[in-house]
Amino acid sequence: MAGSVGFTYSFLLIASLFAAASAGNFYRDFDITWGDGRGMILNNGQMLTLSLDKASGSGFQSKNEYLFGRIDMQLKLVPGNSAGTVTAYYLSSQGAAHDEIDFEFLGNVSGQPYTLHTNVFSEGKGGREQQFRLWFDPTADFHTYSILWNPQRIIFSVDGTAIREFKNFESIGVPFPKSQAMRIYSSLWNADDWATQGGRVKTDWSKAPFTASYRNFNANACIWSNGKSSCSSTSASRNNAWLTEELDTTSQARMKWVQKNYMIYNYCTDKQRFPQGLPKECTAL
């Protein structure tokens, strides 16, 4: 128990340091793409909110496309009875053979924890779900959710702590997202047919509108425009160290601790789902 408290304290300390990361401007960096006024940019571009009611949800996307980068965003999720709602925050390209890197936050009834759902699509194929509980209340304050995407790996992090790593295993025939530029997307929508307890708990529209808030966006990333990258093709410079970044021993230990204590589903251990054998990237770890 003492170890758990120590780790949790460390996470909170890291979170406070992470909150100081430089912030983008939502007017400059994003377009609200749907929702008929339910998405709003506030505080001179320093905050964005998405809302959901019975008529519609809402969403936004980045003006830029990226091909590799470190993307940070602080979110405060729908409070109270959020059952049936999904707040999605992800990178995606377009088309049937698209690539995608997902955070999805599945709401729950009051007092019950959110489910953090992660997935990776490459060449149109997903099915690589890992799900977590969080070690804090994600509705009480803002927390930082990050995606590190470089040619060797994808790392999902929460408040600076890695929770998942998807490595490049092209050498054994597993496609890896590396050739399609992706935009950042986020949406708040109703998915009460599946989101909460397998769809058994429906959205309580008397609690609408449901609202999620965003701030402190930061992209240290290669912008893709007119078929060219903003990053140098030479070895990673000091400012682009993330291009070759990997987890050190301490970060790996923290990730394993989170997975041991807070992971609730891992496709790589679901032998019933894959009776012919687990996916190749699972057995290569």
Image (cartoon, rainbow, N blue to C red):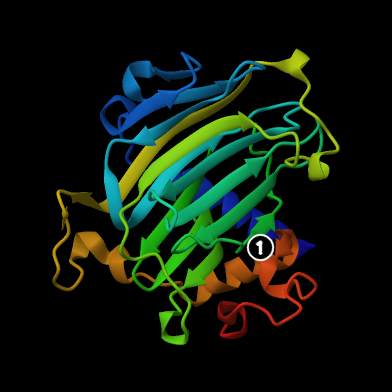
| 207 relative position to 64: left or right | right
- The single residue placed furthest to the right in the displayed view is 200
Number of other residues with Cα within 10 Å of mark 1, as a class: few under 14, some 14 to 19, many 20 or more: many
- Image side of residue 217 versus residue 232, left or right: right
Q: Where's residue 146, x and y in %?
A: 46, 51
* Residue depicted at x 57% and y 57%: 119
Quadrant hosting residue 255: bottom right
Query: Which quadrant is home to the N terminus?
Result: bottom right
Q: Nearer the viewer, residue 248 or 93?
A: 93
Q: Quadrant of residue 45?
A: top left
Q: Quadrant of the C terminus?
A: bottom right
Q: In the figure, 132 relative to 200: above or below?
A: below
Figure check: 216 above or below 261: above
| Above/below status of 29 relative to 177 | above
Amino acid found under the numbered disc labelled 1: Val
Left or right: residue 237 compared with residue 122: left
Point out the residue furthest to the front here: 96
**148 horizontally vs 137: left or right:** left
The residue tagged 1 is 258
Give the x, y percent position of residue 130. Answer: 65, 61
SS at mark 1 in the image: helix
Asked if 120 appears above or below 282 in the picture, the reply is above
Residue 75, visible in the rendered structure: yes
Q: Where is residue 109 in the image (x, y as percent from the top left)?
A: 81, 32
Q: Residue at x 65, y 32 (%)?
A: 139
At horizontal 48% and vertical 55% (from top left) the residue drawn is 101
Residue 147 drawn at (x, y percent): 44, 54
Residue 10's image quarter?
Answer: bottom right
